[in-house]
Amino acid sequence: MNEVSGHEGAEVSCSFEHLPAGRLHYLAAISVFGGVVSDGYAIGSIGAVLPTATTALGASVWDVGAMGSGTLFGLFSGSVIIGAAADRFGRKPLLCLGMALAMLVSLLQGMVTSSFELVILRYLLGVSLAADYVAGSCYQIEFARASNRGHLLGAMMLFWSFGFAFAFQAGYLLCSGGPDGWRWCLMLGALPAGATCALRAWLPESPVWLHARARTEAALRIVKRHFPRHDVIFPAMPRPDEGIVVNNSLLSPKIRRRLMVAIVILLGQLVPYFLVGTFLLNILAELGIRSPYIGGLIYTFFVVVGSVLGFFIVERMSRRRFLILTFLVCGMSLCLMSSGIPFTPVVLLALFSVFALTLSAASCMQYVYFAELFPVVIRASAQGMAQSTSRICVSLTTFGIPYISQLVGINHVLQMTAVWLTAAGLICWAYAPETRDATLRAS
């Protein structure tokens, strides 16, 4: 297939990923960042208000597990469908619909009268956020310029951590202010979701996706509207009506192996992230830290610092080495923290902070590495498959944590998590490919 370009009278010819930075690039990036802020806030808010909401709603230990894991089950359900839908119908419709639903559900959370109602709404919130987890990074990488692609994708985790940290602080302040503070904390998530939805409604569909779906004329019209002085050349790539080459098929050995790597990475990062994030106050209290909320503030501070660190490291170290090292450091710090050695609270907080900083820095790879791991024609489908498979495992784990902790104690739960982190690092050492120099079209 020949490369496709715009009209001959343009002053400058270049590929889409080598266009100069323009207003469209900035607004597309902001719309994705707004989505991940909403995602981070939604995940962090339940951890911040869970103790207060549990008392207010008279929740049982199983209700607590369901409230904590409801969003994760929703992410699993949504990812199954949204990945394929985003590849078939486009990135924009799913991203707009997801934020609109997230805004509505966030408001309804403040009106619940039972733990069952909150569980259902947390599930629906997860379904709505699945669009951002699956299609958000696709939209970002397809609009990103080649020169700053890694930084933009890495910044997604940075903004996620801002939302997560703000949710914890808002929950602490609001829950201290009155018995209904936890309701206001959950409802506050409607603000970033609504603003992001409004911006996304104005933005165009991804030109790269349009070209991949044999709609090159529509892609060129978008480019000409925003970059009238440039003649954009789209690379030749397999079209849906031509069939997809075996190497790009979801069933090919190469893609199956990469899916396995993606699932291991997600489980290695998400199990400890949601375990600690959702039950943070309970964990800190059981570890003997007298002021769990102060400990939580320190933890969220290092989550943000870790995201900043990951943002700067992502283009300075190979993707593969970064993944392996961070898994091993997280496993070691968590192992020491749960070893039973009578550390002082200061030492425990230091270990907890190292764990938070390293895991947060590594989590930026969910946006950077996965977007580069799969070719554009199956990018959202592959990410949806990886997200859905990992989310169901994380959901079941999070759901069972309160009960398991009662049986064996939080130290043993953390020890098992440390073993899994180490195993994930070894699996990445054996199978994870390097993608740092991957092109926009394929890896």
Image: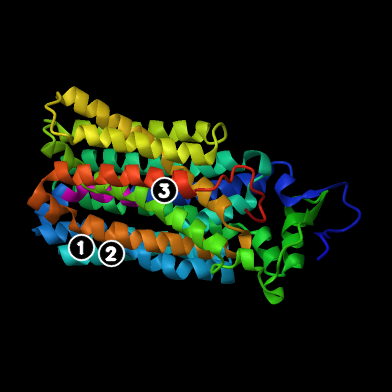
**Callout 3 crowding tier (Cα within 10 Å): few <14, some 14–19, many ≥20:** some
| Residue at the front extreme, as displayed | 430
SS at circle 1 = loop
Residue type at numbered disc 3: Ile
Main secondary structure found in the magenta portion: helix
Element class at badge 2: helix
Point out the stretch of residues depicted in magenta: 42-50
Q: Residue at x 57, y 47 (%)?
A: 29
- Give the label, 3 or 1, closer to the camera: 3
For residue 427, the mark is 3
Q: Residue at x 20, y 28 (%)?
A: 348
Q: Nearer the viewer, mark 2 or mark 3?
A: 3
Q: How is the image coloured?
A: rainbow
Asked if the residues shown at circle 1 and circle 2 are in contact, with their CB atoms under 8 angstroms apart, the answer is yes
Q: Which residue is mark 2?
A: 121
Which residue has dot 1 on it?
112
- Neighbor class of circle 2 (other Cα within 10 Å; few <14, some 14-19, many 20+) is many
- Is residue 98 rendered to the left or right of residue 400? right
Q: Is residue 161 above or below residue 93?
A: above
The residue nearer to you, when weighing 23 against 291, is 291
| Residue 108 vs residue 49, the one in the foreground | 49
Quadrant where the image shows the N terminus = bottom right
Q: Closer to the observer: label 1 or label 2?
A: 2
- Disc 3 element: helix
